[in-house]
Image (cartoon, rainbow, N blue to C red):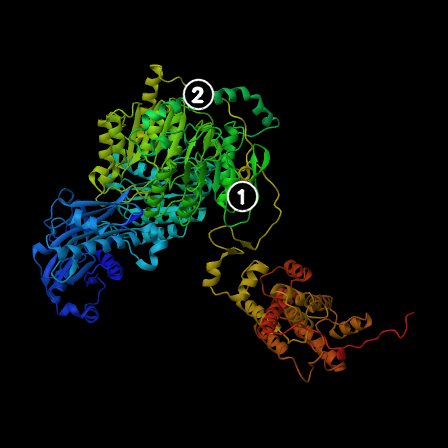
């Protein structure tokens, strides 16, 4: 939802900070807020005026007409206010059909004034303008404001004239001085309204005294999608739920998930103890499921409204499902058991198998509780990879221990609601339709040429339709906005488009659709992406690879592709406004599809204004787009190829539709393909309050198109556009049969206001309800079904009548060409297998959370395993004992550095002083590690292990190495000796001897040291030796490794890893030190070099 109500306190706080900046000249609103946690003593200290002023108190919970309901306490002392609130707080209050608890209150100073000083001001936004209402009398007894108030419309992107305010709004204000002050106030209020993205702002009363203006009562809504623009000015906004519906922590959790996700996740709890729970995919589908449940008598038992859509990940779907299952199984049991309806339309791009896997994981987790609550589950879904998703769900259902019924697109979308409520029999075996994209077999590309004759015939038919359109559009355009441009045909089989955004999957989907429709050339000729340089991107045309240019600038893309007249914009909600304004500067672009959801309403209204001026049609925002079967499709519309084939979108039919919902457009494709000869065009205008083009824009195009024989309209609750359709039916502008249904009929059955999945699907008056619209459409002689459940039957009935009377000649079936399946999708479907290029067993970054050897990163941090614990997971794939982790950390600390003179540090310093970067400098130091410097750990471990394992006495080992002329690695030091011991060795040795369960190899090495130091005092066990032998003791005696595993780690050279990791810390330190000291290029001094050049050339 975009327009969200805020509390009176929040509204007054915003006005306090911004209204007088625009010169309103209004008094600052003084107020205090109170809830159950308020400390009254502290409140009176923070707001001392509470103790000295008569007060007004009222609940602040989006309750209308509080004065009429007796919910305002007037002229009370602080103690009386406390008593007044105490008598009402957390008590049930019935307002209309809603019953809720009063929890939040606002206290203000009582302002003495006369009735004559009370006035009414309201500003609200609509598609083409902002309307200002003013009435010279205000207060609780104002009555019908719409009938009494004077109205002034301020067109979008226009300035408010104070002269207009005075002459049109303030005629009844006789005092010239007062009129001037009120005009300035209204001007400032409107400037604040626009600047801060309000959508509704009502003040009743505005008290105008001789010396000031006071805002007494305020109601307001903000465009929540403008948060990224207005947050610095708004501050943190808390949007309260409607009265009668408490805010649940689970709703807040899902809202937080939604905010962090590119997908859409919504949850509203209607009845915590309800029997019927839903988990529906798609904004439009979620409304239809709620409608159907209510139509079947389940309104009082419907527990929740919600939806997940926009391709949520498996993890996000799991979190969503887990939340619903937890709510469902933590409420009291129901004597009839509970039902979970997991439904949805036919997805456009959401991977059904992936989302179902998340749901299955949650169901498995809650299995005992589901059995305990006697839950029955009904599933219906389709879309990308739905066959695999349904198979997994069916297989899992056999192990769940409760009824789980699974259906696909062969079953009407809402049929499972009747099954779940016992109103419809559950088929024993579903009639499953198995289909997937056609594969291109050898010769398949040639087959396209063989079908050329059929293609030419199709093209000729399209050509004649174009000619007919050109002849008929002028007559139907009169009286309609930009009629000449918006009654034209938007798409043909030669349409060329530019795609804004690096949406490779969507572009490939468009090209595959082109190919399957037998287009001569791809519809996408270029892409625009400002964040990379100009380049070419590889795509498939059938089985051939083609290159599509990607431009950094829109101007370059358009100037180099003069045939383009469509832009498909995948720009984000933050950049869609600027990028669309830019493209409107190019006259060749005639149609723009804006996919992004959440564009602020003010920006959308400005785009509509600019597009109307230039005769450009906008589809969207918040849409999947549209499809012209046999010609062109926008982005992901129509879903995967299997659905396009299934719904016969590769060739034109006779039925055109227009819908708000993108997800439901796919369902309409399915319904229409079953009930008629198919779709000729379908547009989803978008779910926002102000779509770029309206139902009427497209219906009038369909009316003007002789090839369109039947029109289908899928409207919804909210807005009044459907009444324009009624008027056109009644005055004869629409003569073709029109089947219409408005979704959202359930809204009137809920006791509190519910915002459905689309921003525009919320009724602000009785006229905007779905029930009222359906009634009006029926009265205007549209064909209106009894419910969405019977929509397909009615479409079939009307179509059959048209065929019977000869007005429709059903289109002949044309076999579509085969199209190869993408390798990645074939692998997803399990149709192919390929050996992996890499294998890994230590880390997995693919899910919602990074995993180290099976342990989520959150657990790694919460358990405080430390660096040693991370080493144990990533190097050894297991959690090693704490003393081992401590040993690793000690080794890293003692090996981190040994001064600038050693070869590794020296190399790093020289590189750093030569101006090399960090990585190059550190690598130059690491490359010196070997048997002579730091890299003796592995060699030392091998030598001592072999000697110990072959039962050589330490003296025999020393003599053997001397006899072979080999150094004992891990023995000896340039500086340290038995008389000047290495403290590092002492620290590690003492820790190992004290903490390791056994350390025979270290003790063996210490015996060797006794022998070698007798010969020479500096032949001590050094850091390499003590770490290496202790490491082997850890591998062999910690109980965490088998003997084979321990030996394997010794053989692969794992022990050196501690020195490499530790010394990297020091090398980085030396690099930073040299940069910090700003040391110049190093040159070795001559006097430190011995030059031994031959005396003469020989």
Can residue 404 be seen in the rendering of this structure?
no
- Image quarter where the C terminus lies is bottom right
Q: Is residue 75 left or right of residue 578?
A: left
Q: Is residue 699 above or below residue 282?
A: above
| Label 1 environment density (alpha carbons within 10 Å; few <14, some 14–19, many ≥20) | many
Q: Is residue 851 left or right of residue 7?
A: right
Q: Is residue 372 left or right of residue 132?
A: right
Q: Which mark is residue 586?
A: none
Q: Which residue is mark 1?
A: 550
In-front residue for pair 725/429: 725
Can residue 133 be seen in the rendering of this structure?
yes
In-front residue for pair 619/213: 213
Q: Quadrant of residue 1027?
A: bottom right
- Specify the farthest residue to the top: 805
| Label 2 environment density (alpha carbons within 10 Å; few <14, some 14–19, many ≥20) | few
Q: Could you tell me which residue is drawn at 54 percent across and 43 percent down? A: 550
SS for dot 1: strand
Residue 699 point in image, percent of width and height = 33, 29
Residue 74 point in image, percent of width and height = 10, 59
- Specify the farthest residue to the bottom: 979
Q: Which residue is mark 2?
A: 464
Q: Are marks 1 and 2 in contact (CB under 8 Å)?
A: no
SS for dot 2: helix
In-front residue for pair 171/95: 171
């Amino acid at each position: 939802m975009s327009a969200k109500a805020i509390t009176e306190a929040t509204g007054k706080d915003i006005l306090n900070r911004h209204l007088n900046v625009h010169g309103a000249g209004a008094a600052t609103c003084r107020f205090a807020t109170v809830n159950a946690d308020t400390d009254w003593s502290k409140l009176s200290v923070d707001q001392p005026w509470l103790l000295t002023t008569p007060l007004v108190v009222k609940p602040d919970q989006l309750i209308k007409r509080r004065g009429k309901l007796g919910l305002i306490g007037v002229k009370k002392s602080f103690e009386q206010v406390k008593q007044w609130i105490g008598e009402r707080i957390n008590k049930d209050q019935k307002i209309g059909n809603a019953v809720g608890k009063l929890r939040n209150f606002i206290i203000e100073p009582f302002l003495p004034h006369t009735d004559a000083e009370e006035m009414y001001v309201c500003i609200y936004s609509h598609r083409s303008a902002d309307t200002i209402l003013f009435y010279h009398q205000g207060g609780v007894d104002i009555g019908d404001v719409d009938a009494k108030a004077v109205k002034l419309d301020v067109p979008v992107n226009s300035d408010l004239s104070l002269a207009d305010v005075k002459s049109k709004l303030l005629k009844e204000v006789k005092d010239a001085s007062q009129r001037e002050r009120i005009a300035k106030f209204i001007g400032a209020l409107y400037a604040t309204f626009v600047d801060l993205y309000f959508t509704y702002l009502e003040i009743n009363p505005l008290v105008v005294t001789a010396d000031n203006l006071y805002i007494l009562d305020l109601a307001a809504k903000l465009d929540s999608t403008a948060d990224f623009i207005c947050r610095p000015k708004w501050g943190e906004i808390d949007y309260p739920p409607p009265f009668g519906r408490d805010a649940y922590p689970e709703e807040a959790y899902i809202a937080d998930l939604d905010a962090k996700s590119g997908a859409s996740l919504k949850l509203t709890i209607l009845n915590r103890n309800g029997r019927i729970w839903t988990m529906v995919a798609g904004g439009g589908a979620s409304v239809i499921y709620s409608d159907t449940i209510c139509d079947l008598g389940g309104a009082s038992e419907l527990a929740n409204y919600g939806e997940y859509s926009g391709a949520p990940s498996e993890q996000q779907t799991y979190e969503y499902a887990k939340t619903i299952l937890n709510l469902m199984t933590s409420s009291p049991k129901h004597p009839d058991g509970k039902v979970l309806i997991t439904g949805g339309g036919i997805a456009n791009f959401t991977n059904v198998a992936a989302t179902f896997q998340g749901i299955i994981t949650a169901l498995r987790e809650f299995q005992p509780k589901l059995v305990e609550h006697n839950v029955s589950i009904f599933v219906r879904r389709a879309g990308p990879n739905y066959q695999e998703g349904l198979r997994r769900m069916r297989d899992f259902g056999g192990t769940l221990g409760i009824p789980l019924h699974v259906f696909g697109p062969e079953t009407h979308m809402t049929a499972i609601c009747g099954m779940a409520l016992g109103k419809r029999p559950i088929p024993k075996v579903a009639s499953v339709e198995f289909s997937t994209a056609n594969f291109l077999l050898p010769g398949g590309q040639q087959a396209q040429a063989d079908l050329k004759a059929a293609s030419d015939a199709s093209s000729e038919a399209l050509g004649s339709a174009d000619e007919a359109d050109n002849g008929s559009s002028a007559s139907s355009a009169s009286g309609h906005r930009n009629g000449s441009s918006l009654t034209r045909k938007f798409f043909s089989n030669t349409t060329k488009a530019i795609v804004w955004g690096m949406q490779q999957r969507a572009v490939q989907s468009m090209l595959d659709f082109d190919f399957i429709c037998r287009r001569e050339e791809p519809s996408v000729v270029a892409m625009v992406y400002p964040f990379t340089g100009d380049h070419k991107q590889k795509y498939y045309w059938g089985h051939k690879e083609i290159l599509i240019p990607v431009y950094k600038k829109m101007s370059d893309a358009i100037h180099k592709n003069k045939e383009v007249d469509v832009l498909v914009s995948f720009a984000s909600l933050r950049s869609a406004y600027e990028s669309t304004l830019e493209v409107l500067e190019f006259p060749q672009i005639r149609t723009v599809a804006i996919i992004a959801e959440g564009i602020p309403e003010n920006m959308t209204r400005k785009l509509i204004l600019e597009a109307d001026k230039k005769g450009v049609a906008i589809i969207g925002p918040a849409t999947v787009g549209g499809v012209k079967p046999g010609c062109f499709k926008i982005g992901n519309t129509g879903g995967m190829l299997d659905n396009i084939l299934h719904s016969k979108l590769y060739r034109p039919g006779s039925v055109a539709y227009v819908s708000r919902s993108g997800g439901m457009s796919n369902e309409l494709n399915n319904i229409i393909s079953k009930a008629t000869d198919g779709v000729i065009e379908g547009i989803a205008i978008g779910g926002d309050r102000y779509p770029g083009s309206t139902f009427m824009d497209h219906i009038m195009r369909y009316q003007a198109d002789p090839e369109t024989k039947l029109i289908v309209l899928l409207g919804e609750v909210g807005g009044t556009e459907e009444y324009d359709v009624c008027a056109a039916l009644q005055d004869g502008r629409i003569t073709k049969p029109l089947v219409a249904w408005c979704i959202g009929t359930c809204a009137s059955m809920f006791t509190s206001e519910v915002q459905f999945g689309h921003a525009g699907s919320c009724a602000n008056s009785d006229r905007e309800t779905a029930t009222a619209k359906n009634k009006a459409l029926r009265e205007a002689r549209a064909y209106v079904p009894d419910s969405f459940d019977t929509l397909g039957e009615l479409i079939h009935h009307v179509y059959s009548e048209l065929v019977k009377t000869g007005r429709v000649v059903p289109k002949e079936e044309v076999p579509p060409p085969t199209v190869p399946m993408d390798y990645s999708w074939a692998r997803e479907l399990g149709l192919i297998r390929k050996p992996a290029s890499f294998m890994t067993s230590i880390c997995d970054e693919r899910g919602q959370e990074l995993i180290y050897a099976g342990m989520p990163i959150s657990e790694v941090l919460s358990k405080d395993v430390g660096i040693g614990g991370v080493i144990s997971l990533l190097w050894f794939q297991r959690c090693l004992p704490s003393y081992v982790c401590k040993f690793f950390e000690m080794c890293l600390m003692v090996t981190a550095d040994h001064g600038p003179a050693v070869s590794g540090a020296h190399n790093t310093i020289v590189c750093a002083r030569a101006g090399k970067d960090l990585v190059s400098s550190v690598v130059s130091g690491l490359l010196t590690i070997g048997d002579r410097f730091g890299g003796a750990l592995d060699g030392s471990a091998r030598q001592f292990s072999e000697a110990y394992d072959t039962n050589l006495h330490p003296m025999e080992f020393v003599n053997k190495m001397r006899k072979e002329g080999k150094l004992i690695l891990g023995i000896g030091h340039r500086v340290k000796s038995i008389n000047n011991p290495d403290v590092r060795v002492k620290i590690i040795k003492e820790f190992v001897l004290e903490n390791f369960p056994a350390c025979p190899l270290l003790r063996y090495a210490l015996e060797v040291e006794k022998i070698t130091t007798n010969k020479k005092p500096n032949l001590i066990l050094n850091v390499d030796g003590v770490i290496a032998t202790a490491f082997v003791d850890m591998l062999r005696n910690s109980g965490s490794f088998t003997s084979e595993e321990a030996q394997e780690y010794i053989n692969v050279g794992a022990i050196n890893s501690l020195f490499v990791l530790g010394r990297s810390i020091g090398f980085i330190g030396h690099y930073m030190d040299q940069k910090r000291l700003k040391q110049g290029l190093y040159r070795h001094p001559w006097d430190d070099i011995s030059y031994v050049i031959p005396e003469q050339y020989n």
